[in-house]
Structures are given as structure tokens and as C-alpha cells.
Amino acid sequence: MKVTIIGAGAIGGLAGAYMTRAGHDVLLVDRWAEHVDAMNRDGIFIDGIRGEMRVPVHAAHIDALADVVNGPLEAVLIATKSQHTEEALRQIVPLLGGDSFVVSFQNGFNEPRIAEVLDETGVGSAGRVIGSIPNYGGALVDPGHLEFVHEGPIQLGEMSGAPTPRLAELAAMLGELTEVQVSSNIWGQIWAKEVYSAQVVFSALADARIHETLGNERYARVAGAVVREALEIADANGIAVEAFDFFDPANYRVKTADDTARLIANINHAIWLLKKDQKPGGHVFRKQGSGIWWDIVYRNRPSEVRSSNGKLVDFGRAVGADTRLNERLCGMIYEIEQGERQLGLHNFVELEEYVTSIGKALP
């Protein structure tokens, strides 16, 4: 199976490097010319939790993809930021063949829109789409340089929930990087990731380490309230939210003070899991926060909140669910991105006051 990865940043680049190293046919595609040139010249240099290595890879600029590929594309993994999904997809549609399929290898609720675009362009629909959740973490530091930040599995599944040969083959290939968990309810797992990500968005309100944000019990209570509302949005949409790696939705259905205490313990355990592979005295990590934090603070660019958690709010509004808390949180992030609000712990205090004012504080 030939694999084409559109978006050779942390998530796509790490997957491409490990599959290539194992001997698979992989082409990494990106719109950042310096990154593409560096990959073709020097390979991908990876440091972080697994040490240092350099992997020779094949890379192409997105605008030159048609000149590079030989025949129709087969497996296409879209690993761009969510807000660039449709743009990337439309650029590769002319290169799809009868057996081509597209994987949303990213955050966000992208699979339905991918199916719609494929249908609009006459090359297929949901049957061509595979959903995924890459739960490992990394960063694109410089052209040709990736940092592996934390371990985590990949959830992968056909949107129909059925097992298929192409799903099994792709799962085996991605298994060169990390554990792959084949899912019969990938849509429920995608929802789970976005529900959980509400607290990741919350942590990006300040330029601070995770132990100062979600690791602070006062602020973790606010984050828990945000996720609880996000779960209620999922419930209102009839979604069976799946547990994954370090997230169990049952922990966020808080009703009593004891429930809150268990939730805080669960959040602290999740923080430990995210950091456990970062050994003291070893590699000094450049990426010290979430991908949202990385975009805002390090890359100085808009995050994908509008295309991920912003869509969660849209799903809630569509069915009349209460979205006030998640809507306020997303609005605060947008203000930071537009230079209308400063990063800082004061944002947690402001949101805490809002949670209390609308009666959504945890017991």
C-alpha cells in the first residue's frame, strides 16, 4: 500500500518517518517549502522521548504533488491542522483513483466534511473515509526537525464500523510507530477526543506548565466543569462517547463532592501519563504545552480551536444544548489569538467566576 501524508508536521511527520524506516512506501507532502527541502536533503531528524535519530524520507511540496506521484494515490492521510482540511483535500482530489481512501489523521470533527467534499467532487463519499485519533504528541521545531513529546496509541476505524482489509493493512503499517487500536465506533472516539480536548483548550489560556494549569486543583475544577458540559453536548447529540487511553467520560459526570475528588485524582494521573516518559536530566523539551499552546505561543499563528472545539459548540447549538461555558472558553482563546486578551492565570480566575455565575461549578 502506498501512503501519502498531507501535512508533514509533528503527527504526520512522525508517522511517515517510522513507516518509511520500516520499509513502507510513504510520501510526505507539505506546503512549507523549507521543510520539504530539508526533508529531501537531510531526512527527518527526530529527538525527544525515544532519543535521537535521522530517517531519510521522500517529500514533496503540495503544489508539485501531481508531478511526483506515479499513478493514483492509494491511502491518503490528511495530517494538517483542522482548519486546512478542505483546502488540502481539494488539492488531492484529482489524484484519487478507484481504490483511493482518505484518513483524517488529525484533531477535530473532519470526517463528515471530507465525505461531503468527496461527494461534491464526484469521487465518492463516506465509504472512502477512515477516521482516526492520533494520541501521541510531538512538535515541528524547525525545517526537517521533529520533537517526539509523549507516547500514545492511535485509534483507527472505518466510519461504518466494519473491519476491512485496507483498515487492517494501514493499522499494521502505523503500528511501526505506536500501538494501533482498531475501533468499531471511531466516531464515538473522535467525539471523546474533542470532549476531552475542552480541558486542553482551557490549559492554553496561560503560558504556563501543565502542573500550574490542570495540575492546580482550583483550575482543574473549572476544566472539569467545561468537560462535563461538553459531555452533555455529546449526550444531546446521541453520541456514545468512548473511553480512551487516559480519558474515561464517566469520571466527568460529576454529581457529588466525592465524584469531584475522584475527577481531580484522574486529571493528576493523566498529567503524570503525559509526562512520565520525559526523564529528568535528559532531553530538554521545547514543547511544554498542548498543540494549541504551541501554535499560539511558539508558532504565533491561529490554533485549530475554531475547527475542533468550536464545532463542538456548533453541534450543541444545533440540538439546543447548553453551550455557554464552552462558548465562553473558545471566545477567550479567539481573543488571545487576535491580540485582544493577554495570556495568563487571570483567565482561569475569570472563567471560574463565570462557571459559578451560571451555576455550573463542580460540587
Image: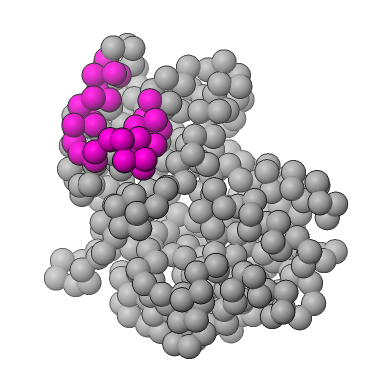
Judge left or right: residue 49 versus residue 76: left
Predominant SS of the magenta segment: helix
Specify the segment rendered in magenta: 328-356
Image spot of residue 107 (x, y percent): 51, 49
Quarter of the image holding residue 95? Answer: bottom right
- The spot of residue 67 in percent (x, y) is 72, 79
Quick one: 68 or 269, which is closer to the camera?
68
Looking at the picture, does residue 242 appear above or below residue 23? above
Picture quadrant where residue 20 is located: bottom right
Q: Give coordinates of residue 236: x percent, y percent.
A: 57, 21
- Give left or right: position of 62 versus 227: right
Could you tell whether 120 is left or right of 276 in the image? right
Q: Residue at x 79, y 72 (%)?
A: 72
User: Which residue ends up furthest to the front in the rendered image?
Assistant: 339
- Residue lying at the far left of the rendered structure: 281
Taking the spot 55% from the left edge, 67% from the top edge, the residue there is: 31
- Residue drawn where x is 46% and y is 21% of the image: 323
Query: What residue sits 81% from the left and 51% below the top?
Result: 121
**Residue 340 lies in the magenta-colored region:** yes
Left or right side of 361 for 20: right
**Vertical placement of residue 238 versus 129, above or below:** above
- x, y (%) of residue 347? 24, 31
Residue 189, visible in the rendered structure: no
Q: On the rendered image, what quadrant is the N terminus found in? A: bottom right
Task: Give the camera-side residue of 342 and 149.
Answer: 342
Please tell me which residue lies in front, 141 or 240.
Answer: 141
Report if residue 42 is visible in the image: yes
Quadrant of the snapshot with the C terminus: top left
Instruction: Judge whether 268 appears above or below 275 on screen.
Output: above
Q: Is the residue 231 above or below the residue 162 in the image?
A: above
Residue 161 shown in magenta:
no
